[in-house]
Image (cartoon, grey):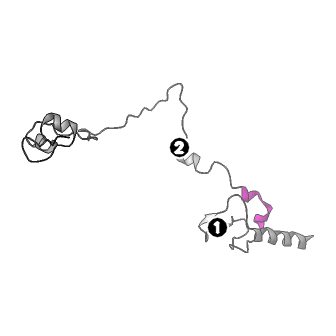
């Protein structure tokens, strides 16, 4: 393979494109023979504002907003009979939900096993 050097500097030309041109990328850009690269992501000159329409199109359904979607179903644990006794695990008062994670999260679907056992003891004492 023949060694080809740049017309403007002693740099060796390794790519077929630069050999065909007779000069390298750096020398071509310095002399304005190769245009500067275009940025891949250009910023828009004017800010874009979102278009909102107050009315729905006939084929669209309204999406409910956040307050209606927060808690679509009631707490199932409130319907359990075990809720009427105090929980020995988390110290929840009768009628209050049991809590998990150090009292930061309510248990909405069930109660602690110890509360169920306390309810069983409470109901067997009554009978």
Checking the image for residue 73, the label placed there is none
The residue lying furthest to the front in this view is 1
Q: Which residue is mark 1?
A: 100
Question: Image height check: is 115 above or below 71?
Answer: below
Measured Cα–Cα span from mark 2 to mark 1: 28 Å
Question: Image height check: is 119 above or below 44?
Answer: below
Badge 1 crowding class, 10 Å Cα cut-off, few under 14, some 14 to 19, many 20 or more, is: some
Identify the mark nearer the N-term, 2 or 1.
2
Q: Main secondary structure of the magenta part?
A: helix
In terms of secondary structure, where does tag 2 sit?
loop
The residue lying furthest to the top in this view is 58
Residue 69, x across and y down, in percent:
58, 47
Closer-to-camera residue (48/32): 32
Write down the region rendered in magenta.
Answer: 75-84
Closer-to-camera residue (71/95): 71
In terms of secondary structure, where does tag 1 sit?
strand
Badge 2 crowding class, 10 Å Cα cut-off, few under 14, some 14 to 19, many 20 or more, is: few
The residue lying furthest to the right in this view is 127
Residue in the picture at 64% in, 63% down: 106
Q: Is residue 8 visible?
A: yes
Check the picture and name the quadrant holding the N terminus. top left
Residue 60, x across and y down, in percent:
53, 29
Q: Is residue 85 visible?
A: no
Residue in the picture at 54% in, 26% down: 59
Q: Which residue is mark 2?
A: 65
């Amino acid at each position: 393979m023949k060694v080809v050097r740049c017309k403007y500097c002693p740099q060796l030309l390794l790519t077929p494109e630069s050999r065909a041109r007779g000069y390298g990328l750096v020398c071509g850009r310095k002399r304005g023979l190769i245009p500067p690269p275009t940025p891949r992501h250009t910023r828009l000159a004017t800010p874009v504002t979102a278009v909102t329409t107050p009315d729905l199109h006939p084929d669209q359904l309204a999406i409910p907003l956040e307050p209606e979607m927060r808690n679509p179903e009631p707490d199932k644990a409130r319907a359990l009979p075990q809720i009427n006794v105090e929980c020995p695990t988390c110290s929840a008062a009768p009628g209050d939900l049991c809590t998990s994670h150090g009292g930061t999260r309510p248990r909405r679907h069930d109660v602690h096993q110890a509360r169920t056992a306390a309810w069983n003891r409470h109901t067997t004492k009554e009978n």
